[in-house]
Image: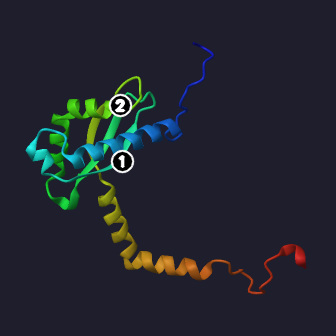
Amino acid sequence: MRGMAKRTPSGQGPSQRQLRVGELIRRTLSDILNRGEIHDPELNAMPITVGEVSCSPDLKVATVYVMPLLGTAPVEKAVALLAKHKGELRHRIAEGMTLKYAPDLRFRPDETYDRLDETRRLFSDPTVQRDIAGDDGDAGSDTDGRGDHDEGAR
């Protein structure tokens, strides 16, 4: 064990396999929820967007980021309903996949849209607009005003 290298070095992003499995889970879960295959009228009445699924390096845990469509219900309620039915959802996802283990599902609120709104708000700030406009005017200009950009051309 002593000479073995770590499989996932710290500081690196997810592996190609983690991304593929996450996307497969996301599509499968979206289809299950869209078709209303879970026997819960409250869950089936709630349109839920599955934004992203991230998998652990060993593919045994999948964190699912969800959001009720157009704010039709509180996100906490959607997460609680999905968590209540996670065993059935896990079973249905496993039917369509060829993994050794069906990953344990953990549901979390998808905060991507909140971050997007915050980013838009920041970009609309007059100070930021002024900084952005100032950067565009300076790009590619030289400091001495002579116009020769190539030092070797003298």
State the image coordinates of residue 150 (x, y, percent, origin top left): 82, 76
Residue type at tag 1: Glu
Mark earlier in primary sequence (2, 1): 1
Q: Is residue 9 visible in the rendered structure shown here?
A: yes
Question: Counting other residues with Cα less than 10 Å from the Cα at mark 1, is it few (<14), some (14-19), or many (20 or more)?
Answer: some
Q: Which residue is drawn at the image coordinates 55% and 27% (left, top)?
A: 7
Look at label 2 and name its amino acid. Answer: Val
Res. 15 in view: no
Q: Residue at x 60, y 18 (%)?
A: 4
The way the protein has been coloured in the rendering is rainbow
Determine whether label 2 and label 1 are within 8 Å by CB: no
Q: State the residue lying farthest toward the left.
A: 41
Q: Is residue 138 toward the left or the right of residue 44 in the image?
A: right
In this rendered view, identify the residue nearer to me: 11 or 40: 40
28 left or right, relative to 151: left
Does 126 appear above or below 64?
Answer: below
- Write down the residue under mark 2: 61
Q: Residues within 10 Å of mark 2 (few under 14, many from 20)?
A: some
Position of residue 106 measured from the top left corner of the image (x, y, whole percent): 28, 36
Give the residue displayed 33% in from the left and 38% down from the top.
63
Q: From mark 2 to mark 1, how far is it between C-alphas?
A: 14 Å
Please report the residue visible at 14 percent of the width from the left and 45 percent of the height from the top.
Answer: 43
Quadrant of the image occupied by residue 80:
top left
Residue 118 falls in image quadrant: bottom left
Work out which quarter of the rendered image holds the C terminus and state it. bottom right
- The secondary element bearing badge 2 is classed as strand
- Looking at the image, residue 147 lies above or below residue 121: below
Q: Residue furthest right?
A: 154
Query: Which image quarter: residue 70?
Result: bottom left
Residue labelled with disc 1? 52
